[in-house]
Image: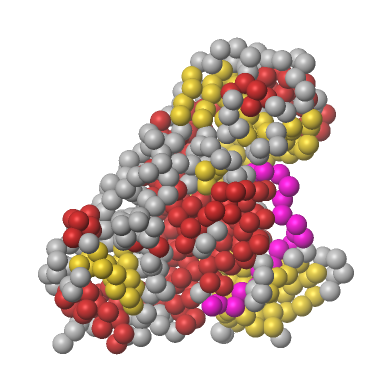
Amino acid sequence: MTRIDVAVVGAGPVGLSATIDLARRGISVMVIDKHAEPALHPKSRAVNVRTMEIFRSWGIEERVRAAGLATPPIRYLGKDVVSPWSDVVESSVIAGGGDNDLSPLPLEVFLCSQDLLEPVLREAALRPPVDVRLSTEVLSATEIEDGVRLELRSRPDGSTETVEAAYVIGADGAQSGIREQLGIERDGEPSLQQSVSVLFRSDLITSRTDSESAFIYIDNPDTVGTVVFAPVDTEGRVAMLGRPPVLDRLPVHQVDWQEQIRLAAGDPDLDVEIIDYRTWEVGAWVANDYQKGRIFLAGDATHVMPPYGGFNQNVGIQDVHNLTWKLAAVLRGWATPTLLETYGPERRPVALFDREEAVLNFRSHVGAEHNGPRTFRTENFHHLGLDIGYRYDQGAVVLESDQPRGPWPVSTYTPSAAPGERTPHVWLDEARTTSTLDVLGSGVTVFAAIGARAADEAVRAAADHGVPATSVDLHPGALATYGINADGAVLVRPDGHVLARVTDDAPATVAKALAAITGTPVVQPA
């Protein structure tokens, strides 16, 4: 019987991301997906700053950029495509976007449709030693004493196979069979609206906006109501998203979509080639639990959000970025399974926060039924705090106060090395090529001034606990950003979030930090 460390069910962007990170950490992985090929429909398209930072850490950022659109998105609002615009919004997450002191990357939403992103992730994930089982269904996943037993069936020939994994990640989409089998309920609205996505080819966007990355929001209750023309690639593919009133009269397959696109554009002679169309539910829900025993959920299996703002896929990739290092730590033996219980408590509040923002964006665009967009929320387009400012207020972190912290801002981000925050970006070399986010190790990374006592103590204590640890020197100008003096230190987890900040009580804080990251009781130093 085949035995592997982690079985990943689902080969979409989230499952592939989990596979990439686990394989990088030397964990044996099997990827199982009922489909042989990636989806042809573009689906998600926004890749936010934090997700691009993660791709940078995996060495695939440039390949993702090469697959997507070269320029940041810009938003146009009008009653059609030929009339004057009623509003135009630049949508970099901050003005200017490019060089900055908050990230090693431009502070811009990058557009790369899912059907263009998946091949890049597949190339990085689906290669030896990863065990790949495509066109394969999971019939059952049953927890056993030391793992999970999976019953698989090959779709081409119907043959079955039993495999065992120490752990399973269910990244099998919004209709997750893994979630259903576990009996995990969802909180929220399963259907805010049934929408249609019509994929077509036309020069509509580039000819009217002089930009390949423009979104055109149509607000015209006399024609198609509220729809969005969204860019897909440089080859003229466009997706029309929304719910035209015609769907209240006709089934989707009886609609003349070429005519509807021309109505929306206000151009009866527009050259339109219909490629595909499909309906989908605009939902807003979050799973009540992210884990049951040795089985974990991630991505659409745990949360679905309205697409306005482009949050859902990013949250999913960041889900597994939180989970995979913890699985590796347990499988490598330097952490206990208790560490895995921090996954849901850390990630679910982020999904709840982003879900509420996405719903506000949806309602501001759609307004009352068929009445068209009422306003553009600033937070829909400028959401740097949501992108890189989210934090963990519980779990594998050592908080500095028992006082609850308020929600993080949506539109603004202030660097902070407080526990739970993403560690601040600081360039470590004069050439500005290596960021603090580029040097994170497989265990604890200790950032401190050269020769700091706390750093030496933390590295020694980690070695005594069998936890991998490295020390990275900060230049004096970075100490204020990290909130420490020359004797302090900041301990950072493999996912870039601050584990603990050491100031005066170094031995006690380090002991708590090692207990948190290993999932063991605190043992105070002698």
- Residue 432 quadrant: bottom left
Q: Residue 209: percent from the left, percent from the top?
A: 58, 23
Who's the residue at 26% across and 68% down the image? 473
Residue 201, above or below 116: above
Q: Verify whether residue 37 appears in magenta.
A: yes
Residue at 43% of width from left, 70% of height from top? 341
Q: Can residue 334 be found in the magenta stretch?
A: no
Q: Tell me if I can see residue 515 in this picture.
A: no
In percent of width and height, residue 21 lies at: 53, 67
* Quadrant the N terminus occupies: bottom right
Quadrant in the picture for residue 232: top right
Residue at the far right in the pictured view: 157
Any part of residue 69 in sight: yes
Locate residue 211, reporting x and y percent. Answer: 58, 29
Q: Is residue 278 left or right of residue 99?
A: right
Chief secondary structure of the magenta portion: loop
Q: Nearer the viewer, residue 321 or 512?
A: 321
Query: 404 or 214, which lies in front?
Result: 214
Residue at image coords 75%, 37% = 277
Residue 23, placed above or below residue 274: below
Q: Is residue 475 left or right of residue 426?
A: left
Give how far across and how far down residue 257 sits, in percent: 77, 27
Query: In this view of the protein, which residue sits in the foreground, 414 or 71?
Result: 71
Which range of residues does the magenta coloring cover? 26-44
Describe the colour scheme in one phrase.
secondary structure
Q: Residue at x 60, y 49 (%)?
A: 66
* Number of numbered discs on residues: 0
Q: Is residue 90 left or right of residue 157?
A: left
10 relative to 329, above or below? above
